[in-house]
């Protein structure tokens, strides 16, 4: 058993540890606070503690578990709400009341609950690691698939079906019992057969993402933005409406009330396809800004490991990390306490590597069980002062393929989603174009390019208009400005509080774009025939376009006369 | 209790002293050779050595002939309902000439509220200030800072809110007032203000003044919030915490960080400032096991009026909106000088708490005012004659909005319905056909005939 010799905030030093290894979990002090070994210097072992260290004294014991920080994966994950190191917050509440006190140890999954295990293998079958050996109906939406743990394979010698707790064996390989759960170290990516590329978009029902800056299943997306632009609301809307089968939502160092909102709201929201509560497909991780900083650093890994586990069952998973800046700051804080040589703005020199490693855990894969699954990662970034040149944003943009740039100016104009269409980009757009053209409407890619072009032209014309006045522009250009305004107000802007507009399915997005495109072509002809933009502006077709977003069953825009 | 007589070094507010397994954050009492005492806290500890932060500063402290006594406890504060009506210094000692007998001792750092135990704040607080109540409504359990500027009357606004704040069921607020690095004049202003209105009986003051040692400033808000949590969550009171000035607090944080030779983050502030500020702001809230609530109005002055400075920036990322003041409004004698552009409240008031038209009316007023301001800028370039009648109507609206809606002064108190009626009256200045954000039925009901 080791003993403490120094304490400085969340970083403590111990000596006389029994075989300390990097990343092993340790119990610190008489209260058994949870910690992790982060550095070994000769006889000294440096540990980061996931709980507050006030009152710890040198001389107190430190014991290693000889295991890295791991999560327990199995039935019971869905609908759960965990802290950064997978302790269920409702169990903590039951034990400790409204405040989180120290040294609480609770199992991550319910050990008493019985699940109906339906085997898919029989005695005598050869199984390999990662193979699906049975299923459990975990929630109204999701069938949990039980996997052979990584590193285990052989001939099944016994199968036990029926109602089981997670502590009962459900099958045996030789003398080795298999359970419905398994442990996995959070910082190690789970293995798969190979990465595959897909052109299937992750549909969100939000026009700015689906139509303009789409992502694919398995994509890597970043949303940077200053405060008050709706970063969190954006993340929550995607969590609500995107067509991933599993959502892992990581509240990393953010407001407590926001997590409360998610906890209270999600059970009441219904999945647009099945009508079942959205919570049934969701795992929440909440390590709010006032919870210990080391656990905040762990929280994004905890979330990612859970996401990968569902991917390995063949599901499309989306993980939201709000906010990766807080995670980076946690790294900076720990690094500072270690006295490491700082890189840019005090962040550790390995910041870029860690960010890249995290985003690279996303992707579409062929799993060990020979099914397809994916993890899409959507990371919020909170740049200080809204300045995108800072290290976390820049390192994220190096790796992320989709950049949704939140804009304070748009938010101030109450233009929501406040995503700047000139600054944002998606490197998946060409891939998804082919999918949309084939599955939704054959002109999808044409409309998308037309729309982007129109908005670009608008920006250039507005610069000129500011100098010479809008009225001195030729009629064709004035009409282009009108169409671009309708694009911004009636298509880009989406009302998250309207029952119809909060979720806009892809076919409706297509019809809306088709109508605006038709308005533009017809209008151009009328302008050539001598009609003015002012006349067209008050035409009833403009009113029709304005009402499109609030209309459930959209019809085609007819001829403009 | 262990006592040592040797110290190794003194540096800024830090004393490096001998110890025998002291506890991290343990309180320490240091006696000088002349018998005078100072207090400190362990910041970093080794088996035989402790880094101690001295609250009162280290002036006159040497390394010889010291008595360093480890008190075997971390920082606590005595709390009780009997704090109301009392004045304490920044270290929690009474300074109103009376003894204080606490009901209970509490750890000043508290513990984080479990997010599943929180109740989302949605109960309306009427501050009696039109701009706040209509455009950025405050809820019980919210944290809504005032982003102020030097030279603006933000203290008067804070006093006005403290004086007028009411919840709809008529419950009164207990006020916990925290001064950090304030001048004597400021502290006296608040004390007199509370005395004059008789609110002092329902107020606790914690005063860390500009002349007090800056290290103690780190403790002051923690003491006060511990008292606030006790009153709210154990005594069921509605507590309003006013903290001024957060910028001074952050300066102290930077000062100590620099002395400890920590790696600085932006503008020399420590990298952990976000976490540190969150450990204060996140103590606002409502929980399931109590009727009480802690609502926070932190005040900060933005250095050089810059909203992207680390103090307002990090605050904005943690708090649920902000009340932004505007120098232009103040120069035009519009008080309280709250600009609705740039201010915001992230929380939604529960249905039925305010009149049905409130939210949409706020949107409409915002849109109309923003349009008016745009034209005001345009007039500066092209002249008023270039504007159409519609444009001029918006220009007039913006003027009237500032005059009648914003400019209510620091003494007037308006009910939310009075505020809404003023809003409707102002909307008559723009063409009725422009009212696209409010519902048709509400126009019928509330539009002045």
Image: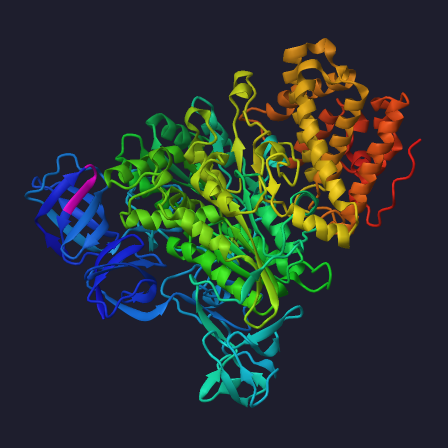
Provide residue B119's location: percent of width, then percent of height.
55, 54
Q: Which residue: 68% across, 23% down?
A: A462
At horizontal 55% and vertical 27% (from top left) the residue drawn is B338
Compared to residue B239, the image places residue B364 above or below, namely above
Pick the residue in front: B440 or A549.
A549
Q: Is residue B221 visible?
A: yes
| Image spot of residue A381 (x, y percent) | 50, 44
Residue A18, position as x, y percentages in the image: 23, 70
Q: Main secondary structure of the magenta part?
A: strand
Q: Is residue A289 visible?
A: no
Q: Which of the two residues, A401 or B107, is positioned nearer the viewer here?
A: A401
**What residue is shown at x 89% (from left), y 26% (from top)?**
A526
**In the rendered view, would you say A4 is above or below B442?**
below
Residue lying furthest right: A561
Question: Horizontally, is A527 left or right of A359 in the view?
Answer: right
Count all numbered tags in the image, as a single digit. Answer: 0
Magenta residues, start to end: B12-16
Q: Quadrant of residue A317?
A: bottom right
Q: Is residue B14 magenta?
A: yes
**In the rendered image, which quarter contains the N terminus of chain A?**
bottom left
Q: Is residue B271 above or below residue B304?
A: below
């Amino acid at each position: 058993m080791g003993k403490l010799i120094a304490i400085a905030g969340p970083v403590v030093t111990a000596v006389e540890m029994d075989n300390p290894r990097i990343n092993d979990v340790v119990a610190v002090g008489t209260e058994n606070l949870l910690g992790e070994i982060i550095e070994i210097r000769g006889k000294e072992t440096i540990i980061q503690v996931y709980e507050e260290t006030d009152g710890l004294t040198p001389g107190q014991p430190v014991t290693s578990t000889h295991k890295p920080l791991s999560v327990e994966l199995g039935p019971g994950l869905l609908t759960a709400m965990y802290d950064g190191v997978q302790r269920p917050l409702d169990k903590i509440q039951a034990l400790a009341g409204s405040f989180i006190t120290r040294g609480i140890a609770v199992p991550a999954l319910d050990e008493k609950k019985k699940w109906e295990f339906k085997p898919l293998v029989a005695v005598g079958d050869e199984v390999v690691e990662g193979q699906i050996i049975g299923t459990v109906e975990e929630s109204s939406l999701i069938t949990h698939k039980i996997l052979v743990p990584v590193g285990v394979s052989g001939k099944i010698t016994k199968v036990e079906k029926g109602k089981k707790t997670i502590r009962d064996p459900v099958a045996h390989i030789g003398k080795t019992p298999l359970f419905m759960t398994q442990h996995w170290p959070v910082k190690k990516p789970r293995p798969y057969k190979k990465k595959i590329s897909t052109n299937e978009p992750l549909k969100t029902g939000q026009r700015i993402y689906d139509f303009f800056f789409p992502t694919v299943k398995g994509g890597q997306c970043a949303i940077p933005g200053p405060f008050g632009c709706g970063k969190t609301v954006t993340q929550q809307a995607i969590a609500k409406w995107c067509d991933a089968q599993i959502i892992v939502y990581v509240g990393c160092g953010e407001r407590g009330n926001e997590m409360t909102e998610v906890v209270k709201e999600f059970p009441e929201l219904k999945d647009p396809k099945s009508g079942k509560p959205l919570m049934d497909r969701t795992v929440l991780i909440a390590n709010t800004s006032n919870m210990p900083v080391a656990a905040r650093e762990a929280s994004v890994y905890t979330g990612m490991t859970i996401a990968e586990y569902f991917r390995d069952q063949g599901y499309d998973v989306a993980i939201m990390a709000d906010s990766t800046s807080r995670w980076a700051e946690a790294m900076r804080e720990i690094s500072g306490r270690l006295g490491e040589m700082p890189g840019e703005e005090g962040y550790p020199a390995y910041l870029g590597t860690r960010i890249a490693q995290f985003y690279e855990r996303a992707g579409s894969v062929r799993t060990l069980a020979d099914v397809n699954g994916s993890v899409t990662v959507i990371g919020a970034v909170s740049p200080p002062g809204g300045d995108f040149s800072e290290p976390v944003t820049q390192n994220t943009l190096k790796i992320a393929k989709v950049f949704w740039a939140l804009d304070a100016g748009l938010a101030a104009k109450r233009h929501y989603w406040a995503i700047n269409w000139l600054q944002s980009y998606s490197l998946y757009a060409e891939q998804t174009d082919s999918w949309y053209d084939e599955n939704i409407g054959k002109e999808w890619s044409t409309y998308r390019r037309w729309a982007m072009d129109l908005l670009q032209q608008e920006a250039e014309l507005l610069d000129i208009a500011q100098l010479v006045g809008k009225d001195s522009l030729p009629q064709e250009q004035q009409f282009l400005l009108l169409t671009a305004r309708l694009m911004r107000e009636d298509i880009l802007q989406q009302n998250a509080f309207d029952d119809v507009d909060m979720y806009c399915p892809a076919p409706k997005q297509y019809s809306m774009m088709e109508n605006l495109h038709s308005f533009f072509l017809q209008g151009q002809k009328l302008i050539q025939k001598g009609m003015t933009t002012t006349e067209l502006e008050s035409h009833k077709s403009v009113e029709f376009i304005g009402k499109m977003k609030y209309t459930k069953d959209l019809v085609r825009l007819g001829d403009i006369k | 209790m262990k006592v040592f007589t040797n110290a190794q070094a003194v540096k800024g507010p830090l004393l490096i002293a001998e110890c025998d397994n002291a506890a991290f954050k343990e309180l320490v009492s240091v006696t000088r050779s002349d018998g005078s005492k100072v207090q400190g806290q362990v910041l970093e500890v080794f088996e035989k050595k402790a880094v101690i932060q001295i609250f009162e500063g280290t002036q006159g402290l040497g390394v010889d002939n010291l008595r360093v006594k480890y008190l075997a406890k971390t920082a606590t504060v005595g709390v009780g309902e009997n704090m109301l009506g009392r004045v304490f210094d920044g270290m929690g000692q009474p300074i109103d000439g009376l003894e204080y007998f606490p009901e209970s001792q509490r750890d000043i750092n508290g513990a984080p509220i479990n997010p599943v135990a929180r109740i989302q704040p949605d109960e309306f607080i009427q501050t009696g200030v039109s701009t706040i109540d209509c455009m950025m409504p405050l809820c019980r359990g919210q944290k809504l800072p005032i982003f102020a500027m030097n030279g603006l009357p933000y203290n008067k606004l804070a006093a006005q809110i403290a004086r007028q704040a009411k919840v709809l069921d008529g419950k009164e607020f207990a006020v916990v007032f925290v001064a950090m690095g304030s001048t004597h004049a400021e502290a006296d202003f608040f004390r007199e203000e509370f005395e004059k209105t008789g609110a002092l009986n329902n107020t606790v003051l914690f005063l860390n003044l500009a002349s007090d040692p800056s290290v103690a400033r780190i403790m002051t808000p923690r003491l006060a919030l511990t008292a606030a949590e006790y009153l709210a969550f154990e005594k069921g009171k509605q507590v309003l915490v006013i903290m001024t000035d957060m910028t001074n607090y952050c300066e102290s944080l930077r000062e100590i960080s620099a002395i400890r030779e920590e790696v600085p983050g932006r503008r020399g502030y420590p990298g952990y400032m976000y976490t540190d500020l969150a450990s204060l702001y996140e103590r606002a809230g409502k929980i399931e096991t109590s009727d009480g609530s802690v609502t926070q109005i932190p005040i900060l002055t933005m250095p050089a009026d810059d909203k992207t400075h680390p103090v307002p920036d990090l605050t904005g990322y943690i708090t649920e909106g902000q009340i932004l003041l505007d120098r232009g409004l103040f120069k035009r004698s519009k008080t309280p000088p709250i600009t609705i552009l740039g201010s915001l409240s992230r929380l939604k008031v529960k249905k039925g708490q305010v009149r049905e038209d409130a939210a949409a009316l706020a949107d409409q007023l915002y849109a109309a005012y923003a349009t008016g301001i745009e034209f005001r800028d345009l007039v500066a370039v092209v002249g008023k004659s270039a504007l159409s009648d519609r444009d001029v109507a918006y220009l007039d609206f913006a003027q009237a909005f500032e005059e009648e809606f914003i400019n209510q002064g620091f003494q007037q108190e308006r009910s939310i319905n009075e505020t809404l009626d003023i809003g409707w009256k102002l909307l008559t200045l723009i063409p009725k056909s422009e009212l696209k954000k409010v519902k048709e039925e509400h126009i019928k009901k509330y539009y002045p005939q």
